[in-house]
Amino acid sequence: MTIIVLLGVLLLVIAGCVCVVWTARGGPRRVRVVATTTTAAGELVSRSGKRRRSNEGQE
């Protein structure tokens, strides 16, 4: 069951990356929405990782 969930997440990540590339080449509106969502999610993950690393250094 865990493998199926991980494969699903992997497919969503790959689809998001494809939409980001497609948007850079001028894709339709629905692709731009998915690309914006993917980019925002990536920013949130990046900020979370930076915050976690900075908190570890303070201990």
Image: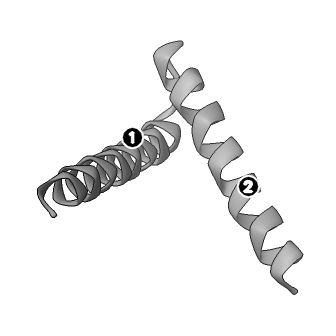
The answer to which of 55 and 39 lies nearer the viewer is 55
Tell me the element at label 1: helix
When the figure is inspected, residue 34 is found, relative to residue 18, above or below; the finding is: below
Disc number placed over residue 39 in the picture, else none = 1
Q: Quadrant of the N terminus?
A: bottom right
Question: Horizontally, is 24 left or right of 50 in the view?
Answer: right
Residue type at mark 1 is: Thr
Question: Horizontally, is 21 left or right of 5 in the view?
Answer: left
Q: Quadrant of residue 5?
A: bottom right
Q: Position of residue 18 (x, y in %)?
A: 65, 32
Q: Which residue is denoted by mark 2 in the rendering? A: 10
Give the farthest residue toward the front.
59
Question: Horizontally, is 13 left or right of 34 in the view?
Answer: right
Q: Position of residue 53 (x, y in %)?
A: 28, 51
The answer to which of 1 and 25 lies nearer the viewer is 1
The Cα atoms of the two marked residues, 2 and 1, are separated by 16 Å
Residue type at mark 2 is: Leu
Tell me the element at label 2: helix
Q: Quadrant of residue 52?
A: bottom left
Question: Horizontally, is 43 left or right of 35 in the view?
Answer: left
Q: Position of residue 43 (x, y in %)?
A: 31, 44
* Residue at 18% from the left image edge and 59% from the top image edge: 55
Give the farthest residue toward the left.
58
Asked whether disc 2 touches disc 1, contact meaning CB atoms under 8 Å apart, the reply is no
Q: Earlier in the sequence, mark 2 or mark 1?
A: 2
When the figure is inspected, residue 2 is found, relative to residue 40, above or below; the finding is: below
The answer to which of 42 and 54 lies nearer the viewer is 54
* Residue at 19% from the left image edge and 52% from the top image edge: 57
